Image (spheres, rainbow, N blue to C red):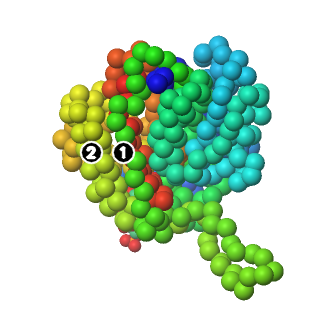
Amino acid sequence: MPFAKIKAVAHSVPEQVVTNDDLAKIMDTSDEWIYSRTGIKRRHISIDENTSDLAAQVGQKLLEQTGYEADTLDFIIVATITPDSTMPSTAALVQSKIGANRAFAYDLAAACSGFVFALSTAEKLIAGGYKRGMVIGAEVFSKSIDWTDRTTAVLFGDGAGGVLLEADDSQPLVIAEKLESDGSRGGSLTVNQLELNSPFSDIIEKEKTSLQMDGRAIFDFAVRDVPKNIKATLELADYEVDDIDYFMLHQANSRILDKMAKKLGADREKFLQNMEEYGNTSAATIPILLSEAVESGKVRLDGSQKLVLTGFGGGLTWGSLVIHI
Ligand code: ACO
């Protein structure tokens, strides 16, 4: 059974930076409130690029880094909950934009766990015989935010990141994984609901389509359920916390990361963080973090390091991968 290897990592964010002070000019908030509660200072907000544009930029960078031709790709998975449209999928748009005419392409919707779920899926595709593909997390969340709601508008940003994977016989990429969902708690975080609307239905459900969040419930979910998941995944891998070089968790809030590190008894320095610059970019946070870690030399793609990648968010969904990278 062929193993998968991450050959390249890249990210792309819109140029426009919106600081906390910029937000304070259009809503009743402050840099002090936002930074002390979340660790966020700035976010990048798209002016004229949609989700597929950012994702295609990532795809193009991955091809440039590896020197591979686009038509050598077998598949493209885009993890997103802010697609350009539900049909065609954002992945299909990326396939066309980068000219990957042999690749099959589809979106995967698992909110802020999307990249972790998609990477797990892609690893199985490679084990099943496909040779090369991309997994990209991409969001333009700014189009799904209620910009009059200060309790949610300050948290999110736009961006994309991704990896190019290929079959390789050196060592397994995923050492252990545990992916989880609980739809019964899904109402605590919702976005982009589609109303029933046909001449045959009396039911007209008028739901809010912008992001709605019970912040406290999500905070409690993150600090209660997610550390248990990480512990269980480490046990499956037969690793201790100290065996891990870096923990790359979804970037929602630095206080969540503080609590997770404490619960796991792990060195907080190993929990890499960049929400200060990007805010919460949902499915894109982990690949952007990984891409920056590779750029800075913290993470090498030489097979010598062990990482934990953990996503958590709407669905509810959460899950971890212990990987050799
Ligand atoms: N600026 C100023 N004041 C604000 C703002 C703001 N942007 N937002 C809320 N407030 C006010 C509230 O109105 C409230 O005022 P009141 O006491 O007069 O009613 C006060 O601040 C406290 O509000 P809380 O909601 O209780 O604030 P809390 O300390 O819980 O922090 C936060 C809110 C940061 C959202 C927190 O609940 C949290 O981090 N939750 C996790 C949710 C998260 O990260 N979601 C991201 C998406 S989900 C995901 O990625 C997993």
Residue 25 in sight: yes
From mark 2 to mark 1, how far is it between C-alphas? 8 Å
Mark 2 vs 1, N-terminal side:
1
263 relative to 43 in the view: left or right: left
Tally of numbered tags: 2
Q: Quadrant of residue 63?
A: top right
**Which residue was labeled with disc 1?**
178
Q: Position of residue 113 (x, y in %)?
A: 47, 48
| Amino acid type of the residue that numbered disc 2 sits on in the rendered structure | Ala
Q: Quadrant of residue 49?
A: top right
Q: Quadrant of the C terminus?
A: top left
Q: Position of residue 105 (x, y in %)?
A: 68, 38
> Alpha-carbon neighbours of circle 1 within 10 Å: few (<14), some, or many (≥20)?
some
Report the residue at 32% width, 61% height from top: 220
Secondary structure beneath dot 2 equals helix
Q: Quadrant of residue 317?
A: bottom left
> Do labels 2 and 1 touch, CB within 8 Å?
yes
8 relative to 194 in the view: left or right: left
Q: Nearer the viewer, residue 71 or 141?
A: 71
Is disc 1's CB within 8 Å of ligand 1? no
Residue reaching furthest to the bottom: 202
**Which residue was labeled with disc 2?**
232
Q: Position of residue 177 (x, y in %)?
A: 37, 40
Q: Nearer the viewer, residue 101 or 267?
A: 101
Q: Position of residue 233 (x, y in %)?
A: 30, 41
Marking on residue 230: none
